[in-house]
Amino acid sequence: MADQMKPIATLLLGLNFCMYVIVLGIGGWAMNRAIDHGFEIGPGLDLPAHFSPICFPMGNAATGFFVTFALIAGVAGVGSLISGVNHVRSWTSESLPSAASVASIAWALTVLAMGFACKEIQLNVRNSRLKTMEAFTIILSATQLFYIAAIHGAAGIRR
């Protein structure tokens, strides 16, 4: 049974990597746009009392939080690829703890970003790129959990 999970873990590893790269790409675009076209103030003027640096020029009130946490989750997800490739290559119980811990951290951050994605969907004002990023984040919260379950297939194998 343990060897039957290796192809599934490999497939989920590749799928998650591609989706995390897409989330990072769209999140990078949103962050760049927020920096370039965000709040501008003239010289000698003060910031308003209720100014928030997480306010994005596109989307709604949840967009800044969603993009920030999705970028952090994306970086952690791509980082889990490194230990995941090592674990799938050796497929022993000795390589499982590092792969499982990094994947669990990436999953927890992805679920946090998914919460902000759900709030952004509820507030209902966003563009198509943000909708795509929301969809990938919600899908990633499930596939990353399945990946964590799949890599535990090597728990009984010792070499």
Image (cartoon, grey):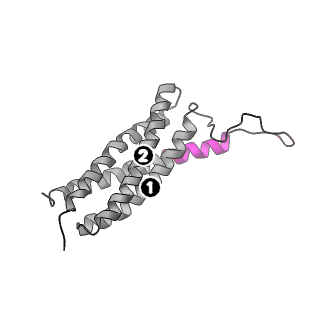
Answer yes or no: is residue 85 visible: yes
Q: CA distance from mark 2 to mark 1?
A: 9 Å
Q: Nearer the viewer, residue 157 or 6?
A: 157
Q: Do the CB atoms of the residues marked 2 and 1 lie less than 8 Å apart? A: yes
Judge whether residue 112 is colored magenta.
Answer: no
**Percent of width and height locating residue 90:** 25, 69
97 w.r.t. 131: above or below: below
Q: Nearer the viewer, residue 117 or 59?
A: 117
Q: Which residues are magenta?
A: 25-45
The three-letter code of the residue at mark 1 reads Ala
Dot placed on the residue nearer the N-terminal end, 2 or 1: 1
Residue highlighted by disc 1: 76
Kindly indicate the quadrant of the structure image that contains residue 4: bottom left
**Percent of width and height locating residue 1:** 12, 57
Circle 2 residues within 10 Å: few <14, some 14–19, many ≥20: many
Q: Residue at x 41, y 50 (%)?
A: 20
Residue situated furthest bottom in the rendering:
159
